[in-house]
């Protein structure tokens, strides 16, 4: 509501400044109006009026950073550990590095028997999963903070990721 | 294996310093110097892009430079593009892919001239406002976003290029964010770094399910990249960007010529 009032108010101010139609001032005023409309549409993503962030917003940003940071570290550590296990097993059993990354089911069968290709494949999959983890972590954080707008935006990204999984099948 | 490790190290460091995934260097190095088939090289490159993004990202997010919300918004367009690009890559011939790659190298080499050397005056705009602490001056820098629709459009394009050619797309995203969208350079590098991870994950899934992931190449290179990225994020603030850019541009053009030659040779 506040935003619409401001837009109208700004338009009125512009009208006063405009003066004779056909002058550069008038052209400029019209341009500003379409920019205002565009900005209202973009209001979907906007946070608030121009100005300094509130303390709550700053804190929510810091919290989000922390969550994302943790997800990244989690993914990276898991991935590096798995890859090193795989490489170690590879060296111990004199097993050469596999030429292809194994599909999902074969990985889990192989893990129990300690086969190097399984660990290596898992490591790579974990690496691919790390950004995804980052996105999921953000989603949870947005939901917890009840930021539904960004929860939906994040969900859309996850949806597209999901489509890429189905493309392969 | 050691060759791949070394290559990964170099690529990871460079990539982290410039906010790009390093794929732009990695793929030519793999295909031209080591004779790896292009679709496999792309598969390995995608893994390394994710590695760079995650490793350098951990540092950037820790410093509060990454604009997480902007990244999410732009990622809608970028992942959509990555999907389209990845599917197309599966369908077209390797020679065409190599040709496209050569063209992108030329574009990147020339577009790098436009990177701003210093932060332009950043100011809040009411749209996706945020701020970060500049490590050099210790001051808080506040900024907002401009020209979001243009940003979305180019993000979709960048996503396509990423899915098609296995590069992160950061070379497109960093200039767009810093020149068009009003994001200060450091923040755009950090944010782009985050975004390329997600974009690459989308294409990675497609390449993985179609069997183009080769662990013999991907793993040593990825490990090298992980270490290189750590070095790169820490060096990035100190090296003179002008010199770095020039060296990079020359290398890109050299590789572009090589790739055109390979594409034509049939």
Image (cartoon, coloured by chain):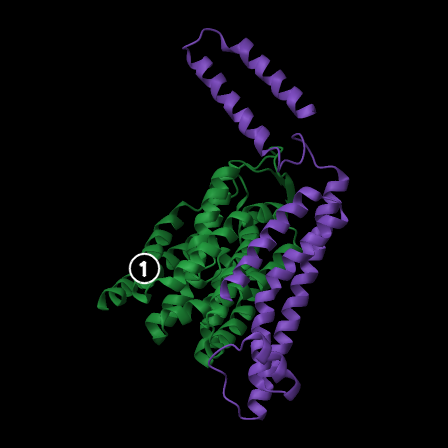
Chain colours: A purple, B green
Q: List the single residue furthest toward the front.
A: A169
Identify the chain of the residue marked 1, using the numbered disc in the image: B
Q: How many marks?
A: 1
In the figure, residue B131 lies in which quadrant? top right
In the figure, residue A50 lies in which quadrant? top right
In front here: B19 or B244? B19
Q: List the single residue furthest toward the top.
A: A20
Q: List the single residue furthest toward the left.
A: B265
**Residue at 61% across / 70% down in the picture?**
A126
In front here: B125 or A116? A116
Residue under numbered circle 1: B102
The secondary structure type at the circle numbered 1 is helix
Local crowd at mark 1 within 10 Å, few (<14), some, or many (≥20)? many
Residue B47 sits above or below residue B3 on the image: above
Can you say which quadrant of the picture contains the N terminus of chain A?
A: top right
In front here: B202 or B60? B202
Residue A29: give x, y in percent of width and height: 49, 17
**Residue at 63% across / 68% down in the picture?**
A76
Residue B60: give x, y in percent of width and height: 61, 56
Residue B155 sits above or below residue A7 on the image: below
Residue A55 sits above or below residue B135 on the image: above
Residue A38: give x, y in percent of width and height: 54, 29
Residue B139 visible to the viewer: no
**Residue at 65% across / 62% down in the picture?**
A72
Residue B167 visible to the viewer: yes
Residue B85: give x, y in percent of width and height: 43, 56
In front here: B264 or A101? A101
């Amino acid at each position: 509501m506040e935003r619409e009032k401001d837009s109208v108010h700004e338009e009125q101010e512009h009208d006063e400044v405009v003066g004779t139609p056909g002058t550069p001032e008038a052209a400029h005023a019209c341009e500003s109006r379409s920019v205002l409309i565009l900005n209202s549409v973009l209001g979907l993503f906007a946070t608030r009026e121009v100005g300094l962030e509130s303390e709550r917003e700053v804190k929510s940003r810091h919290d989000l950073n922390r969550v994302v940071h943790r997800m990244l570290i989690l993914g990276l550590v898991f991935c590096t550990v798995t890859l090193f296990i795989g490489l170690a097993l590879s060296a111990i059993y004199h097993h050469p590095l596999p030429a292809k990354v194994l599909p999902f089911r074969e990985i889990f069968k192989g893990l129990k028997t300690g086969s190097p290709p399984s660990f290596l494949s898992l490591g790579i999959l974990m690496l691919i999963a790390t950004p995804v983890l980052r996105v999921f972590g953000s989603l949870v954080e947005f939901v917890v903070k009840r930021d539904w707008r960004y929860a939906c935006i994040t969900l859309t990204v996850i949806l597209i990721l999901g489509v890429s999984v189905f493309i392969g099948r | 294996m050691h060759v791949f490790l070394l290559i990964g190290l170099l690529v990871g460091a460079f990539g982290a310093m410039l906010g790009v995934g390093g794929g732009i260097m990695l793929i030519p190095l793999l295909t031209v110097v080591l004779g790896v088939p292009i679709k496999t090289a792309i598969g390995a490159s995608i893994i390394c892009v994710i590695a760079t993004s995650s490793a350098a990202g951990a540092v950037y997010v820790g410093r509060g430079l990454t604009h997480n919300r902007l990244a999410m918004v732009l990622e809608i367009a970028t992942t959509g593009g990555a999907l389209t690009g990845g599917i197309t890559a599966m369908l077209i011939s390797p020679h065409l892919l190599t040709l496209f790659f050569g063209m992108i190298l030329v574009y990147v080499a020339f577009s790098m001239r436009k990177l701003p050397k210093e932060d332009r005056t950043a100011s809040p705009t009411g749209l996706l406002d945020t701020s970060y602490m500049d490590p050099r001056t210790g001051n808080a820098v506040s900024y907002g976003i401009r020209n979001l629709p243009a940003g979305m459009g180019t993000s979709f394009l960048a996503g396509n290029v990423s899915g098609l050619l296995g590069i992160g797309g950061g070379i497109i995203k960093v200039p767009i964010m810093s020149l068009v969208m009003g994001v200060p350079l450091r923040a755009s590098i950090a944010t782009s770094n985050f975004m390329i991870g997600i974009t690459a994950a989308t294409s990675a899934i497609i390449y993985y399910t179609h069997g183009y992931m080769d662990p013999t190449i991907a793993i040593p290179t990825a490990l090298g990249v992980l270490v290189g990225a750590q070095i790169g994020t820490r060096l990035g603030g100190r090296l003179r960007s002008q010199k770095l850019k020039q060296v990079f541009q020359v290398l890109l053009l050299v590789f572009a010529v090589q790739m055109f030659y390979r594409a034509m040779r049939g």
